[in-house]
Image (spheres, rainbow, N blue to C red):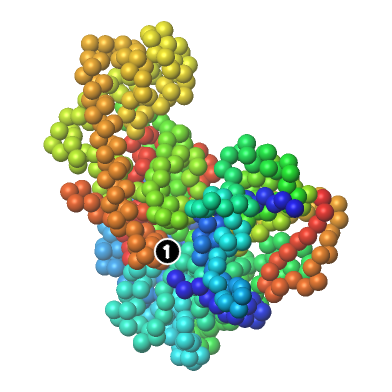
Amino acid sequence: MKTPSLDTVTKLFNQNTDLYFVKFHNAGLASLNREISLLFRLIGDQKELSVWPDITMILKKIRFELATLPVPAERLITTQLITRLNNSLSICRDSFPDNLEQLSRIIQILSELRGEKNDFLNWTKSQCAKNNTKKPCLCLLQSRYVRPVEQSIKKENYLHGVNIEVTSAQGLKKFNFFNQIYFCGSISLFSENHFRNYEFVWRAPRASRLYFLSFDWIRDNFEPKPALDVKPNRVPVNIIELRCSETEIDKKDECYDNNNDGSLNADELDFAPIELILSGSSGTTSGEYDSICDSRLLMLEDGSFIYKEIESSSRIVEFAPQPEIKKIGNNKLETEMPLIVRTEGSGDSIAAVADMLFGKKSEIIRRKQDEWKIAFRKRLFTYATVQDVASILTDLGAPTANEINVRNWQRNDTIKPKNEEDFKAIMIFSGLANQVNEYWNNAREIDLMHKQAGKKISRLLLDKINDSSREDLEKYGRIDVEIQGLAGKVSVIRIESILPQICRVPSRKLNKVLNVEGGF
Amino acid sequence: MSCLLFGNASAIKQEIDQANFYVKSNNEYKKISFQHILRFENFMTDFDLPRHAILNSQESINTHSKSSDMVLYDGSLPFLNHQGIISGRMEIIFLDRTDPQFSSACGELMTRYIDREEDLNIFNKIPASVELVAFKE
């Protein structure tokens, strides 16, 4: 990446950036929003029942995508999406007849919207032509949309030859400067909220003109103050409002004003699947003798999520001064760290590669390991406290049995205690005294294979990490590595945010990348 | 005057290695890096007299902090992690608006500003678009 000259930066800062609010009036989208909001009100307390969680997610996601992505509606409102909603409609027919009409209306509007062009694309195209912009940029909220949008614009030539760079908010952290940046979505989405803080896009502007493209049915609450709110400090932008109802955009209906009841607060528009995942996790029942772990939910830059147990560790990539794979305690994970995860296939990347190295015998080895873990937990759960168990294990000859260690030993992701005497005590406690050697040797074999797997992944990742893949990480938010013989992929994805609250989740949910399915 | 800087060691090394410039000596221009001036002990390959060192233990930080006239924080995270633990006669804090913890660091700094003894007018002109506060505690 070429660093801009000092002149460029000085000029940019001296001029002071102009920040434009561009509000489009689109009757179809406004109507869709109105009907979706009405449906959500009608569902009320039933939102957790039957098909409603699925329908809610689909509708929130499509509303969010239609309001924030620069692609024609037909790319987002796919026939599969309409079919899925129609299937839900048939279930509603019997169970929720009161809401049938409302859902039908929404499906009807979505079908009609499929023929619509994209307001953001039309306007960006005309602006670039009008201003003869040399270096424009289209900025999306999330990096996971960058590649499909980029491909879609290129393939269909939506911008008629305008050479535009597509990036995400995170991509604007680089020293990459443009003449104009067109932000797709309300400025409130590019601000600070519970999950992320994208205020830097206007606090550290990367162009002399920033356009925030949104719709008049979305309410913004933007009253910027200097970060250090002391005179003579000021926000680094001049704010200018533009309304686009008089342009080529639909003029059939009157524009919304901010107090109109049908308008939507940008926070409500924000599609935060993390909330759905959190609400889903609270009701999850754990499997038999599955341990419940204190964990944190990490939001990754590509829009996926992962639970990480606080007491456990993860692998990250450190790029400077030389690319290096590092093991780090989960309590030390921070935003923007490039985390190594398994994105396709189930489970942890190390365990998956170890299984691959084990070959056919992996199933037997894992089953044997599960046997003593389950027997141990089965016995452990009959005691009132973990401390009681630690005392018993000490009496049975375990030299390092304490509350923390016992908690670690019973977890599925730990392999075995370091000390063999601790292991013997666990076996006696679990009623497996006659099979100590068998289980110990099995666990040692897993331990060795995990170490080999760790080295293999590190080697493959380091081979893959070069300038081009680093650019991929910056632009698209991830690097994917296919490992021969292993189903699925291992990826490096940057951590976008870490939820402060502690979640208690079953161990089988840990380290698995959770995605919100479907869509563009 | 001795100075203690809290920042990212990799970033410091990168800056020291990559920021090259020329100096004129005996009518000849020589290309040098910051390492020639700063002489970080940790990055020296040959025997030389070091001027600076990267400290990587809390113990060594505590020892050096006693004799530091100035403490510099390069970035939001170093500031949030170390402020209050180490205090220099003078503290200079650089916060980058793109730092993930920028907002928290500003909040922390403003909390200290509210309890200030007096404002300091040490800059005649603030560079465009840069925000700044200077105060005595």
What residue type is disc 1 on? Glu
B19 on left or right of A232: left
Query: Considering only vertical position in the picture, is A311 above or below B28?
Result: above
Residue nearest the observer in this picture, B54 or A38: B54
Query: Residue shown at 82%/54% (left/top)?
Result: B136
Whether residue A486 is visible to the viewer of this picture, yes or no, is: yes
Residue identified by numbered label 1: A474
Residue nearest the observer in this picture, A101 or A330: A330
Residue nearest the observer in this picture, A470 or A376: A470
Tell me where residue B37 appears, x and y as whole percent: 61, 61
Tell me where residue A145 appears, x and y as whole percent: 38, 66
B91 on left or right of A400: right
Query: Residue shown at 19%/42% (left/top)?
Result: A356
Q: Chain of mark 1?
A: A
Label 1: state its secondary structure.
Answer: helix
Query: Residue shown at 36%/23% (left/top)?
Result: A417
B96 on left or right of A458: right
Query: Considering only vertical position in the picture, is A405 above or below A183?
Result: above
Residue nearest the observer in this picture, A329 or B67: B67
Tell me where residue A334 appears, x and y as whole percent: 50, 48
**Residue farthest along the top direction in this orientation:** A395
Query: Residue shown at 23%/51% (left/top)?
Result: A483
Whether residue A352 is visible to the viewer of this picture, yes or no, is: no
Q: How many marks?
A: 1
Tell me where residue A386 appears, x and y as whole percent: 45, 18
Query: Callout 1 environment at 10 Å: few (<14), some (14 to 19), or many (20+)?
Result: many
